[in-house]
Image: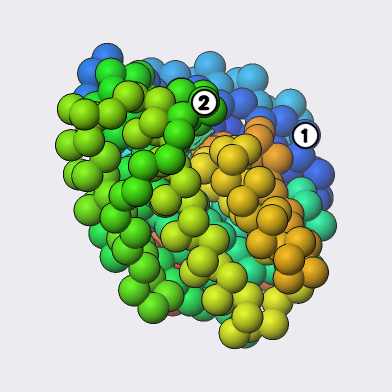
Amino acid sequence: MKIIGIESTAHTFGAGMTHNDKVISNVVDMHIPKEGGIHPRKAAEHHAKIAGKIIKEALVKKPDYVAYACCPGLGPCLKIGAVIAKHLAIKFNIPIIPVNHAEAHIDIGIKTTGAKDPLIVYISGGNTQIIANRRGWKIFGETLDIAIGNAIDKLARHLKMAHPGGPKLENLARNGTFIKMPYTVKGMDLSYSGILTHAKNVLKTHSKKDVAYSFQEHIFSMLVEVSERAVAHTGKKEILLVGGVAQNLRLCEMFKIMCNERGIKLKVVPPEFAGDNGAMIAYSGYLKAKQGFTIPIKKVNYFQRMRVDQNLQEMFKV
Ligand code: ATP
Ligand code: FE2
């Protein structure tokens, strides 16, 4: 079973192929705004412009199915993916599989790390969620306001770093020293907007590297605390980090300390599958196709909002 997967939910356009459960191609191109954050229409224009070239490169075999990320994401960007899915379905005369982008981040994480039944920490530009499988995905904790990647990108942008700010802020943070900042955990949930405002303010009186370091230490500690509580409640024996922020080495190090103390395993999605990519959509589509979930062209649709615990199949019912 060969599947071409299309990712276009936000800043990245990606196309990748799987042959059964193996990834055989994965090509991505990220839209980098000249200034400011991601503008949905500008990102969609980027996707439309680059799509032909990326898909051509990714199509290393003739596909039997096309999978596309139908949710959640930015309207104009999702629309491009849906249109391309229809186009490929007609061109190759193949069925279509809609995929939840968040679920694809999880599926590829489990696949590439060999995790069995992990507590999942999904950390990206748009999400901060602690998830576990309890006869379907259940969300145990999440951010009450902005996502962790978004908080990082906003502080980085304030420091005049180009998007995405995560890797640049991580570098800057290497030699900083600790300043106390607001730490907001409420039960199983956390909040990042207060500390972001605080971090921007203290830049007036402290060095950039100290602010970057302390900001990371706080936002990562909050995440580790909530994840540890989730592990204690659920009894899971492994933690899996997925999403773009999982590439942060300091974050991985902090999780590793907690996991070692509890005698559980830490698994981290490999960098090439951490950020948005088409191969994860193809692989998630493969799991859906095995269950017999495909849709006809006239049912192709997209949803800007969709949580990982919502039933996608329901959304495509006749
Ligand atoms: P979502 O999956 O919620 O729709 P997204 O698709 O925008 O969000 P990803 O592509 O999974 O997110 O991740 C992008 C985020 O990862 C950005 O916020 C980026 O700054 C962050 N990121 C990438 N590398 C690092 C790093 N080394 N340290 C911290 N953050 C990082
Ligand atoms: Fe993503």
Residue 29 appears at what percent x and percent y?
50, 23
Q: Secondary structure at mark 1?
A: strand
Camera-side residue of 171 and 307: 171
Residue 301 appears at what percent x and percent y?
36, 55
Q: Which tag is nearer the camera, tag 1 or tag 2?
A: 2
Camera-side residue of 43 and 252: 252
Camera-side residue of 242 and 89: 242
Residue type at the position of mark 2: Asn
- Could you tell whether 36 is left or right of 64 in the image? left
For disc 1, the neighbor class at 10 Å (few under 14, some 14 to 19, many from 20) is some
Q: Quadrant of residue 205?
A: top left
Camera-side residue of 263 and 267: 263
| Dot 2 beta carbon under 8 Å from ligand 1 | no
Give the quarter of the figure containing the C terminus.
bottom left
- Could you tell whether 30 is left or right of 113 in the image? left
The structure residue drawn at horizontal position 32% and vertical position 24%, both measured from the top left corner, is 207
Placement of 114 over or under 245, stated as above or below: below
Placement of 162 over or under 24, stated as above or below: above
Distance between mark 1 and mark 2 Cα atoms: 39 Å
Residue 237 appears in the rendering: yes
The structure residue drawn at horizontal position 59% and vertical position 84%, both measured from the top left corner, is 233
- Could you tell whether 133 is left or right of 70 in the image? right
Residue 11 appears in the rendering: no
Residue 58 appears at what percent x and percent y?
65, 26
Residue position marked by numbered label 2 in the rendering? 175
Residue position marked by numbered label 1 in the rendering? 24
Disc number for residue 256: none
The structure residue drawn at horizontal position 63% and vertical position 55%, both measured from the top left corner, is 255
Placement of 292 over or under 303, stated as above or below: below
The structure residue drawn at horizontal position 57% and vertical position 46%, both measured from the top left corner, is 251
- N-terminal of the pair, mark 1 or mark 2, is 1
Q: Secondary structure at mark 2?
A: loop
